Image (spheres, helix red, strand yellow):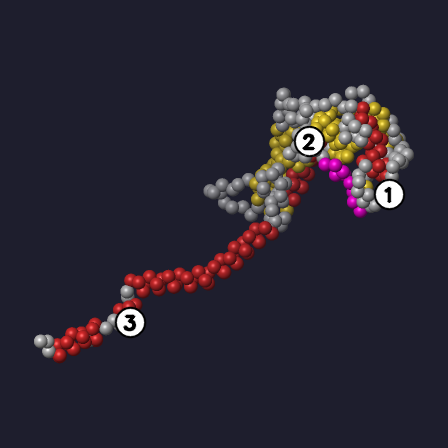
Amino acid sequence: MRLPWKKNRQQDWWSEPAQVPTDNGIDTGPRYRAARRMRWFVTACVFLCPVLALTLILVVSQTLTSPQPTDDDGGRGVEVPTQVRAAALTEVEAWIGQDPSPLPAGAQVLGWDRAEPVPTPRYATAASWETWTAYVLVATDSAVYEVGTRVNYSAATDAAEAVGTPSLDVLPTAEAGWSSDMWAGATSVTVDQTTDRAVNAWATAFASGDADALATVMADPDLGHTYIPLSGITGVSVSIDHAAARAVAEDATPDASTLMVAVTLDITRDGAERPVSIGYDLLVTGAGTGTARVVAWGPPGTGTDLAPWQNAVTGTTRAAASVPAPTTATATPEEN
């Protein structure tokens, strides 16, 4: 038989002060420490995430609004100061114009080419100015040259000065074996009479100085579009140099009813003794049918990019017309 005092003593063992868990004991437990670290991490995320998001927005906005480098250096992404270009062009112009000239008679400056900053060696003492090597294109009757000159530039005063003597290098001539095709990969076609008539009608209206006559030939369905012709022409003749089939859309197959036509206009201005030649690419739709017409024109080589009625000028409403207005110039077809 167990005595009562022994039972009570066994039940009270866990209640003794030395065995009761304390707050310090709980704080030093591994689970509590892990939970406390997690609480600090969550709290930091709550406060830092908005700050980081705002910082990212500011960085992106500054990147998008900051001025981008110009292509004054020939596409290398380095912005060339205006004073550097001016000093180089002035120096080269004076250099080729001196007597005697380093180039044959008739040499002329074609224009600006590019400029490159000259890096300062690590062992050299930093200067208060920048040094640039500028290149200018110069042409004679027989060759094209690249003239290089050194230009010192001070950003503090925005001043530049060409120093030294310019260099002279001959640019290589065109290589043999160039394709003679007007539009690479295009299938050449023979121009029929309907296309020939459409081209001649366009040339006559384009050189007439009459905007209504040109708009009528273009047959633009938008009466808010007008077209600007050449003026001051007393005579024009047109010759078709090349023609090729073109797809109506990028993903379509080239169709013989849509043509790219390269033409040469020989125009005579009022008071001129002889005509001069100008070239165009034309977009012709409805080729081979009674509705063949020129719907766009552009510089030579742009035939593949022409879109119907892209030359329209908006803002002036024209009246619908079914009969072309009288023209002052008459196109004369020439033999190909």
Residue 94 sits in quarter: top right
Residue 190 sits in quarter: top right
Q: Tell me what residue is drawn at x 53 percent, y 41 percent.
A: 119
N-terminal label among 3 and 1: 3
Q: Position of residue 24 (x, y in %)?
A: 28, 70
Mark 2: secondary structure: loop
Relative to 97, is 70 above or below? below
Relative to 235, is 26 above or below? below
Q: In the rendered structure, which amino acid carries the disc numbered 3?
A: Asp
Mark 3: secondary structure: helix
**Residue underneath mark 1:** 319
**Residue underneath mark 2:** 247
Q: Position of residue 85 (x, y in %)?
A: 65, 41
Q: In the rendered structure, which amino acid carries the disc numbered 1?
A: Ala
Mark 1: secondary structure: loop
Give residue 54's mark: none
**Residue underneath mark 3:** 23
Q: Residues within 10 Å of mark 2 (few under 14, many from 20)?
A: some
Q: In the rendered structure, which amino acid carries the disc numbered 2?
A: Ala
Q: Tell me what residue is drawn at x 76 percent, y 38 percent.
A: 309
Picture quarter with the C terminus: top right
Q: Residues within 10 Å of mark 1 (few under 14, many from 20)?
A: few
